[in-house]
Image (spheres, grey):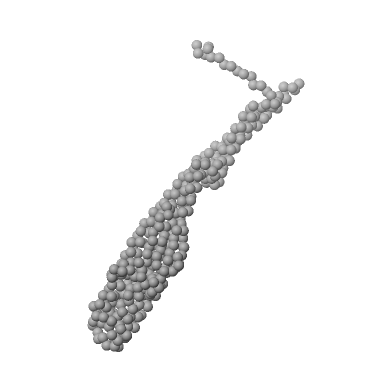
Amino acid sequence: MLLQNLKVEIRPMSLSINTNTSSMVALETLNATQTALSATENAVSTGKKVATAEDSPASYGIAAQMQGNISGQSAVNDGLTFAAKVVSNSDSAANNILSVLNNVQQAVTSLGNNDTSTTSLSQLNDELSGFFEQIDSIAGGATINGVNLLSGSASATNTLYAGMSTTGTSMAYVTALSGQRSTLAGFGSITGTAGTTFSATGSTFSSMLGLSATTFITGGTALAGSLTDLVKNVQDAITNVTKFTSKLGAASQTIASLSSFGTTLSDNLTAGVGALTDADMSAESAKLTSLQTKQSLAIKSLTIANGQSQNILSLFQG
């Protein structure tokens, strides 16, 4: 019954020399294939599925913003790297100064086992002067690009990296993309054992510690105080420098943590941009093969459709 009721309507195909419908359809198909093939070839050659805003306005805009953040974080990371070098250099210098101060304490304490004749005191005066020159030399050499956290001299402000500024006694650096900053003050800002800060602008490091040969020897011929007081002066200096090394150690840990996070953030931002814009090369390869095949078939189809007009001539041949 179903077959009996089924009606098939067959419309004859007209031949026209003015309108070749088959050719029009084949040409549209070929043009669409060519457009898709061009996009795929561009993705294969650039490695990006979104290379311009035309490819995907939303993805391109988000990726551009993220790329800006990557550049900003790179500047933050550079500043943190420099800050870490300054702290490391300062810590190394401070520890070398501690070694010299230990020699100072040994020399001063030895007075209790020796005579305090003019000759002995004169020799000790020369020895102490040499120690303090070492201390000042070490502190003065702890400079990186104009930054010296052991200096008591406040030089003009320097700009090193984006968001970073320094003086001779402190260092400010950016810690995050949001513009947050941290300032690491130098030795001159810490509170010493006497409860005051070392505000000796333009002085040497040994004088900031309150140490000089005359602190211990008066005129090279007499002790400047009791042996107990003199030893305490050295011990206080050692305590103050040790306090500063602890501050540097804490700053080093903080900077290292920020640097690690900054590196991770940069990697995540880069991966995010890649997810938005990078092409899947395996998928693009398969698409390229498919579109090349479709292109060949569309050209063949257009060739056949264009040949239909030639069939009209056969109708007029005797």
State the image quarter where residue 204 is shown. bottom left
**Of residues 235 and 264, the one drawn nearer to the viewer in this rendering:** 235
The relative height of residue 312 versus residue 295 in the rendered view (above or below) is above
Q: Residue at (37%, 72%) from the top-left corner?
A: 200
* Most distant residue in the right direction: 318
Residue 154 on image: x %, y %: 41, 69
**Of residues 174 and 22, the one drawn nearer to the viewer in this rendering:** 174
Q: Work out which quarter of the rendered image holds the C terminus and state it.
A: top right
The relative height of residue 301 versus residue 239 in the rendered view (above or below) is above
Q: Residue at (36%, 80%) from the top-left corner?
A: 130
State the image quarter where residue 209 is shown. bottom left
State the image quarter where residue 242 is shown. bottom left
Residue 19 on image: x %, y %: 67, 26
* 99 displayed left or right of 19: left
Residue 299 on image: x %, y %: 62, 34
Q: How many marks?
A: 0
Q: Residue at (24%, 84%) from the top-left corner?
A: 114
Residue 211 on image: x %, y %: 32, 76
**Of residues 213 and 20, the one drawn nearer to the viewer in this rendering:** 213
* 60 displayed left or right of 85: right
